[in-house]
Amino acid sequence: MNSTRKTAVVAGIFFLITEVTAILGMLLYRNSVLSTPQFIVSSSMDDTGVLLGAFLEVLLAIAVVGTGVTLYPIIKKQNEGMALGHVAGRVIEATIITVGAISLLAVVTMRQGLAGTTGPEAVAAATVGQSLVAVHDWTFLFGPKFALGANTLLLAYLMYRSRLVPRFIAVLGLIGAPLVFVSATAVLFGVYEDLSTIGVLAAAPILAWEVSLALWMIMKGFRPSPVLTGVTQAVARDVAPAAA
């Protein structure tokens, strides 16, 4: 297996990790801290779901950065500025995700000293807990929605122009990226809830893009492209008239 093929496989694995960790992490959160307003003072709830969810989000953040760093040496040959922007965007996305995980871990830390509290103290503690949960909710919007939309647009465009993967896969990204960004904007202004039916449907194309991209890179690798020989399309256009 040559280095280019290995790069495709590693990048594909990173993309699959982002999907699995994001979905499982959210399910763990929704069954504990996100669905129980009094979680911070409850003595009957278990912290395990939150701790596992946070751990999965750490893995998610690592995988998100991994997708950008792994693909950079390949896609920079198509457009170095956009490829660098993709890496920077992935770092920002991962940072936002990490902040969200830390906010829920703070709830767990506070709960260790507040579990079983009653009366006005319990009300105040619950308010603080819900504030931290709200921070996570906003990071979920700005990281896996706004930042993801911008990052996907960059990568899908580079994949479309370079033809490293079939164009129908790149088109999924070009459709899904603006769609998820517009959906996030609608959620931001209260048009509908993030995890509503409309919100989930709006995220479907970008999910299809990431899964199909990952599977193609793992099973097929990159398609033959001038990018892989170090000759970009722009260079090819400049050389052709001179040769003539």
Image (spheres, rainbow, N blue to C red):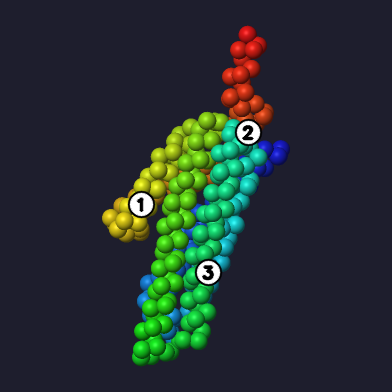
- N-terminal label among 1 and 3: 3
* 10 Å crowding of disc 2: few (<14), some (14-19), many (20+): many
Mark 1 touches mark 3? (CB < 8 Å): no
According to the picture, the residue beneath numbered tag 2 turns out to be 77
Q: Is residue 197 visible?
A: no
According to the picture, the residue beneath numbered tag 1 turns out to be 185
According to the picture, the residue beneath numbered tag 3 turns out to be 102
Q: Which mark is residue 200?
A: none
Task: Judge by depth and name the residue closer to the eye, 210 or 158.
Answer: 158
Mark 1 touches mark 2? (CB < 8 Å): no
**Image point (55%, 44%), residue name:** 86
* 10 Å crowding of disc 1: few (<14), some (14-19), many (20+): some
Q: Position of residue 71 (x, y in %)?
A: 61, 42
Badge 3 amino acid = Ile
- N-terminal label among 1 and 2: 2
In the picture shown, does residue 120 fall above or below 72? below
Q: Position of residue 56 (x, y in %)?
A: 54, 64
